[in-house]
Amino acid sequence: MNSLILTAAARLLVPLMVAFSIFILLRGHNEPGGGFIGGLIAATAFALYAKARGTEAACAALPLTPAAIAVTGLAGALAAALWGALATGHVLGGVWPLLETAPDGTKEGLPVGSILLFDVGVYLVVVGAVLAILFGLEDDVIDEDDGAEDDGRTVNARADADGGPGDGGPGAGTPPGGLTDGPDPGTARPGTTLEGGR
Amino acid sequence: MIPAIAAGGALAWSVPWMPGLGVALSFRVDGLGLVFALLVTGIGAFVMLYAAAYFRTHPNKARVMALLAAFEASMLGLVLADNVIALFVFWEATTITSFLLIGFDHDKAEARDKALQALLVTGLGGLALLAGLILLGGVAGTYEMSAMTPEAGAPALPGHALYPAILVLVLLGCFTKSAQVPFHFWLPNAMAAPTPISAYLHSATMVKAGVYLMARLSPTLGGTEAWQWTLTLVGAATMLVGSIWAMRQTDLKLMLAYTTLMALGTATMFLGGDTPVAIAAASTFIVVHALYKAALFLVVGLIDKTTGTREIDRLSGLGRAQPLLWAVAALAALSMAGFPPFIGFIGKELKYEGALAVASEPLVVAGAAVIANALMVAAAGLVALAPFRPRAGRATTPVKGRAPVGMWVGPIVFALAGAVFGIFPDLLGRPLIQPMTTAIVGEPASIYLKLWHGINVPLMLSVATFALGVGLYFALPRLRAGLAAAEARGVPSAEAAWEAGVAAMKRFAAWQTRVIQGGRMRVYLFVEIGALAALLWGAIALAEGGLPAVAPPAMALFEWGLVALIAIGAIAVVLTRGRMVAIAALGIVGAGVAILFVLYGAVDVAMTQLLVETLFIVIVAVALLKLPRVPAGEGPWWRRVRWGALVIAGATGLAVTTTLLAVLEIPFDRRITTFFEQAAVPDAFGRNIVNVILVDFRALDTLGEIAVVVIAALAAAALLARRPTTRPEVMADGAPAGEGEARGR
């Protein structure tokens, strides 16, 4: 969009960051990392993508809506909890179906099971939740750019609680929060530098 | 089953519910439970039949029948539950179903208001009851009521320090549920419900739940002067208030509602009598009252259905057109008035016998009982004579339609039962009343119900009652006029006080919402952070040993440098007026903290901090654009500083610092750390202890946290989506403007 460097770098960085986030997620049980950190990295990757190519493109790149991703993650964590409950009798008890007890009492095999599923759930919740809020805010910024075309108008701070999505009209694009939309004499508006190309 | 319980046995059944807390879904059928269960199911069956006919053309027939069935199940659970927590759950279930049934005609504002009032009164009492029952269970060491009595080996409660609190809380629950003075007003108001519902809930069963619980807990809580006086006085007051105001009513159903108050007061008063005779009087009267009152309510429903009115002054000469209805009404009313040979007569004789034997003030109780019963005689005449007898100067009320058969069965059965039990009292006495009395008294009681006791004081009182009652009936118009005049002058009303209290609470809620949640971010932050500072300073002030000794921590030079960097970043955030500068300075603070974490070996925390910081800056950068700009002050610097914010921020910062230093003074307990270090690899197959704790050892915490995160994100997304999107070109799929919030994100 506005920055060729950012767009080009994002093309390279975003897949790397997503791959790295999964790496961090998987190694988390033994080395620094885990679902929370991995989820944050993946969310950062998509935030970068959204900055470079726009929110719409970022939304299209995701397999599900952010809210659906978060809910899927929570469902996965709950499934891990129930799996433990069914297999061990304790909710969230650890289950490792691929582990086998060797004759000398040590356990061998791949330690993959309900705990990893739980961690994946955490990862998805973090990705989904962060992106849901971020993309929601980004939409707002788009609105604000529209609203800025109106002449300076102060909206009551409570208006956003009352105005439903359906109320159109000339004030529809005006943001809430009592923001005076006119040109700000104090500082350069950071919004224009961030979203400048629009 | 009945013979086994009549012989003094009890049936019990239990499944564990929350074993760790001593809560079980346990049921126990003894004499008391059995009588109430038979009332609930017996009257319930006929009322259901009646209701099916009464509502046969009503569009919401299915709903009312389902609610009645749900109520019946709850009520049955209530009277059979042995565990107090299970009892409370059923108790609240009857409150809720009662709310829905009173408000059945929910398109009428009056029905909604009265339903809400009943819900609030009984719900408030229910909360008190829950507190009382939990205290009771804690003191007794068990939640099973059958194990709480002294006979079962539990410690005697009345001497306990918490006994007064338990008594007050439990009785609050019982008094609100059973509509005792001063909470009586909700019951007449609940007559906004259709007649079958009033007959079932508000005369025969639900309102007796409080009486039932008092009877049930009588062996545990009773026997003290506080118990006897409270129950006797409150019961007597309710009895008199109910019977006197019944005379004022012109609506037959409303009049019956007031006589129900009288009955509930009577039962409470005799339970407070605390002697076997008084308890037997209460037991018999509960059964007697349920029979005649259900019959009379259903009769009034029939009058209403066939003539279209329940106003006494508009009814006249119905007896000619509806002789059967008159007969049923007369049978039930004779039992209510206590004429021989009806069961009501036996109940009344027992009442007088019990009144003379009560523990506290026999003469006062007996006198109050005579007055109330005389008023009942007048009320019986009002319901069984006035509408049916042709009256001088009044046209005979036309009968508009015929009632279906289903509406006749219940009243006929109840009215006949009153006569049959009166002639053969042993049908009722031995198998039901005696075990019930035994269960309430807590020790074997032998009760024989007889019609003829010989010429004794109770009989004399009965004769006096009849004379007084007949006299009152003929003086009724004058009595009513007098009461109406008193009402017009204004009598102190518990309902007005209640409504004023509710209104004051609403005003307070509105006021505090306005103050605390003003809709402005600054106000929210002020309240939240100010509360945190107040709590911390409160904890510090109340801590033993006062303020901890604060010594400057020993740190290396580069650590001091890092702290200085963080401090500079924080100060810059506060002082700068440019938003981009503030965001960047915030980044310095976050990065500095992350480096601190690395220095102290918390790599996971540092990584998280750094990443959160990164995303935080992105989100803040976007969000700051939306926040209102608080105009900068004019004039010299001391005019521009926001002193309030400065005080709160300073107080919070100092409090957090002090608390942290105090916490660090405590020697570090390594037991948990050692356990995690040892258990992580063998038990959870992970070497990163932080992650193992997060997803395995303390995974329940994490589960709760991610649930909160999801809810917060969905709420935020929903709030943000409320904003209209009016820019067509951002629609990826070309959807028309206005549906933008439905767009996939």
Image (tube, coloured by chain):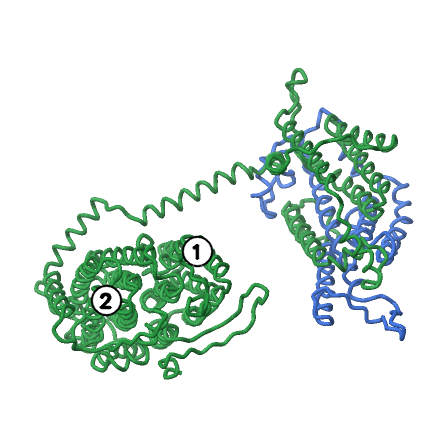
Q: Chain of mark 2?
A: B
Taking the view exactly as shown, the residue that stands out farthest to the left is: B392
Decide if residue B388 is on the left or right side of residue B25.
Answer: left
Q: Chain of mark 1?
A: B
First reached walking from the N terminus: tag 2 or tag 1: 1
Decide if residue B567 is on the left or right side of residue B42.
Answer: right
Q: Is residue B632 visible in the rendered structure shown here?
A: yes
The numbered mark at residue A21 is: none
> Which residue was labeled with disc 1?
B160
Q: Locate residue A112: give its quadrant.
A: bottom right
* Observer-nearest of B323 and B264: B264
Residue B75 position within the rendered picture, expressed as x and y whole percent measured from the top left = 41, 69
Which chain is in green here?
B
> Which residue was labeled with disc 2?
B354
Q: Is A156 placed above or below A30 here?
A: above
Q: Is B703 placed above or below B609 here?
A: below
Neighbours of disc 2 within 10 Å: few (<14), some (14-19), many (20+): many
Q: Is B411 placed above or below B609 here?
A: below
In what element is the residue under mark 2?
helix
Q: Locate residue A120: give its quadrant.
A: bottom right
In what element is the residue under mark 1?
loop
Q: Amino acid at mark 2?
A: Gly
Q: Is residue B63 visible in the rendered structure shown here?
A: no
Which chain is in blue here?
A
Q: Amino acid at mark 1?
A: His
Residue B389 position within the rendered picture, expressed as x and y whole percent measured from the top left = 13, 69
